[in-house]
Amino acid sequence: MLADTLRFFIQTIGGLFAVAVLLRFLMQVMRVPFYNSFAQFIVRITDFAVRPMRRVIPGWGGYDWASLLLAWLMEVLVAAALLWVRDFPFSLAGAGVWPALLGVGVLELVKLTLYLIMGLTLLRAVLSWMNPYSPLAPVIYPLTEPLLAPFRRMLPASQFDFSPMVLLILCQFLLVVPLAAIERALFGSF
């Protein structure tokens, strides 16, 4: 029971931090204005880790690679901590376990990105119905618009916007079919 509680806290705290740092990276990539209170909140809660990391990993090409690296490292640490809680024999596995953990970190980061896209798309749909002038709108709309615009151009014009539904279906497909197959092939029962 203690191990289950510890796993829950590791996944929750590590996952929330990874989401915050990944969201910071995506907001910078999508050119979200950082004057918004929500964007400032994300910056404040991640600054303690991103600023020191920027000294080691500078921005390149206009992107904050330190934030993305932090999100990936957090996923690797969560995977390693979960194995440690399950009494995984790291000493017997040797150094061969670390490339697998790095791969798990990449897969988990891709899955987290897809889940974040799905959550932001759902939030945008709800905001468009309930309160399109919400304080979150200046953050949510620029994050989702580049993903929804291509589907809007492909779908026939109608009174209803079906692009969020198409994006959600595509994300779910990517989560279920290719990522799950890669995960099973590479890591099996790991």
Image (tube, rainbow, N blue to C red):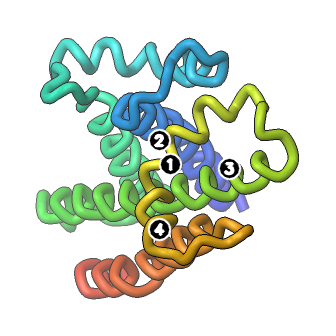
For marks 1 and 3 on the same chain, the one whose residue lies earlier in the sequence: 3
Q: Residue at x 52, y 49 (%)?
A: 144
For marks 4 and 2 on the same chain, the one whose residue lies earlier in the sequence: 2
Residue for badge 3: 124
Q: Nearer the viewer, mark 2 or mark 1?
A: 1
Disc 4 to disc 2, C-alpha distance? 28 Å
Disc 1 to disc 4, C-alpha distance? 10 Å
Measuring from the top left, give residue 99's x and y in whole percent.
16, 60
Measuring from the top left, give residue 106's x and y in whole percent.
28, 58
Residue type at numbered disc 2? Ala
The quadrant holding residue 164 is bottom right
Nearer to me, 47 or 78? 47
For marks 2 and 1 on the same chain, the one whose residue lies earlier in the sequence: 2
Nearer to me, 8 or 59? 59
For marks 1 and 4 on the same chain, the one whose residue lies earlier in the sequence: 1
Q: Residues within 10 Å of mark 2 (few under 14, many from 20)?
A: many
Residue for badge 1: 145
**Considering only vertical position in the picture, is 179 above or below 76?**
below
